[in-house]
Image: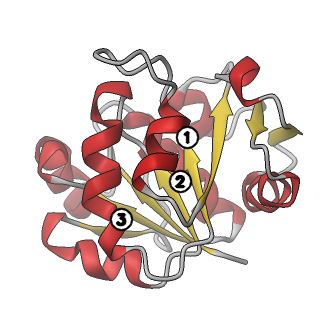
Amino acid sequence: MALVTVFGAGAAGTALAIHLARKGEDAVLWGSEHDAAVLGDLTEKRRHPALPERLPDELRILGPDDLEEAGAHAEIAVLGANSAGAGPLGRLVAPALGGARLAVSIAKGLQPETLERVSAVYARELPSIAVVAMSGPSLAAEIAEGLLTAVAFACEDEGACKEAAEAFRSDRFLVSTTDDVVGVE
């Protein structure tokens, strides 16, 4: 069991945090000021307004003022910004990630200004952490509901890719691994 912190309380990040907590991982969901519109529902109602499922009681929810706590003991950081927000999120969380070994990028697309792949942006912002790219097809609502989902994890570091995959893999969340990061992204 790994301590997994999901940075970004959008629907996709929240759905993955629900999955990880339901699977038995020590999961934390951290929301930034960009997630302010949903943080109240997450903490008070234990629901994300865009998702059908309640948050498991075991899932810890932290807000913008709790960044240090969210990152301090994280072993795996799930980075839930969209492609345009990848650089800012990476820079924001980097100082808080004390012992994280892995970062899992869940964004689709390319950086709007530079056309860089999101995993490359995170690799630049988090140089001492192996970055794993995740790709579906998957929908946040289906992940939250626990419907059968298959994804690919990609990283040039085979060991890092397998470690990240193991944290996510379950009988309802199938994960294949590859070193073809460009192909997956």
| Real-space Cα separation, disc 2 to disc 1, in angstroms | 6 Å
Q: Nearer the viewer, residue 54 or 9?
A: 9
Instruction: Quadrant for residue 95, please give it.
Output: bottom left
Badge 2 crowding class, 10 Å Cα cut-off, few under 14, some 14 to 19, many 20 or more, is many
Tell me the element at label 2: helix
**Is residue 45 toward the left or the right of residue 179 in the image?**
left
Badge 1 crowding class, 10 Å Cα cut-off, few under 14, some 14 to 19, many 20 or more, is many
| Real-space Cα separation, disc 2 to disc 3, in angstroms | 24 Å
Residue 93 coordinates in the image, percent (x, y): 32, 62
Callout 1, which amino acid? Ala
The residue depicted at 84 percent of the width and 39 percent of the height is 174
Instruction: Quadrant for residue 180, please give it.
Output: top right
- In the image, which disc is placed on residue 94? 3
Instruction: Quadrant for residue 38, please give it.
Output: top left
| Real-space Cα separation, disc 3 to disc 1, in angstroms | 27 Å
Q: Are marks 2 and 3 in contact (CB under 8 Å)?
A: no
Q: Are marks 2 and 1 in contact (CB under 8 Å)?
A: yes
Quarter of the rendering occupied by the N terminus: bottom right
Callout 3, which amino acid? Ala
**Residue with the mark numbered 2:** 18
Tell me the element at label 3: helix
Residue 152 coordinates in the image, percent (x, y): 78, 32
Query: How many marks on residues?
Result: 3
**Residue with the mark numbered 1:** 144
The residue depicted at 80 percent of the width and 62 percent of the height is 163
